[in-house]
Amino acid sequence: MVLNPSLSDKAQHDFLLVQKAKEGDQKAYAELLGRYRDAIYFMLLKMVNNPSDAEDLTIEAFGKAFKNISQYTPNFAFSTWLFKIATNNCIDFIRKKRAATISLDQGSDDQPTASVTIQSDTPDPEASLINDQKIKLLREVVSNLKPRYRTLVELRYFKEYSYEEISEELELPIGTVKAQLFRARELLYNILKNTSSNM
């Protein structure tokens, strides 16, 4: 495929990486992830103002981009395409979150009041039970992953290793660890989504 001459040198390099990624080159995925992970994360953090949500949305954005990488065309920069995926996914997330917020006071027709969400400091027994069930389900799902993904997820989330510690433990480059963790989390996300919709 001929490169688009209007693309910058950086965008042309990205395009070559995308071509390698389409052929299954893990290093190309890892390099694309390394080039844009922080930029995507900080953009999403500004949108949702919550580090945990921003981290999850970053994972989802790369998961969707990598899953649909065959659809990318060099009419515009890969970064433009990636940021659009991340932004649209985040907007959907914000909409769903707003829809799930329970309005405590609907107000009168003339004076509608903003919905209010009250959070209690004491743990809700039902929420704790649901959380325990989720953790149990997550562990069951993780146990069914391929061994390399299972090990990565267990080290990162159950043992709370840093990327550097995982890299040393498994003798893998950090870029590879991050790329494979994104893959593993995407698999988990899809399995859990299908499981919860069948419950």
Image (spheres, rainbow, N blue to C red):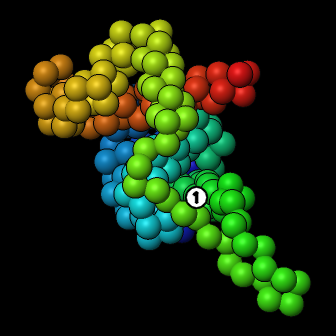
Q: Tell me if 138 is positioned left or right of 30 in this view.
A: right
Task: Say which residue label 1 marks.
Answer: 90
Counting other residues with Cα less than 10 Å from the Cα at mark 1, is it few (<14), some (14-19), or many (20 or more)? Answer: many
Q: Which quarter of the figure is the C terminus placed in?
A: top right
Which is nearer the eye, 78 or 155?
Answer: 155
- Percent x, y of residue 121: 40, 55
Image quarter hosting the N terminus: top right
How many marks the image carries: the answer is: 1
What residue is rendered at 50% in x and 50% in y?
57
Q: Is residue 45 visible?
A: yes
Secondary structure beneath label 1: helix
Residue 154, percent from left and from top: 30, 21
Query: Where is residue 124 shown, x and y percent of the image?
Result: 49, 42
Figure quadrant of residue 152: top left
- Residue 142 in sight: no
- Residue furthest right as drawn: 109
* Residue drawn at 72 percent across, 72 percent down: 105
Q: Nearer the viewer, residue 197 or 77?
A: 197
- Residue placed furthest toward the bottom: 110
Residue found at x 66% / y 42%: 71
Q: Is residue 69 above or below residue 138?
A: below
Q: Residue at x 15, y 36 (%)?
A: 164
- Give above or below for 32 relative to 144: below
Res. 90 image quadrant = bottom right
Q: Is residue 179 left or right of residue 23?
A: left
Query: Foreground: 125 or 21?
Result: 125
Q: Which amino acid lies under the numbered mark 1 shown in the image of this protein?
A: Cys
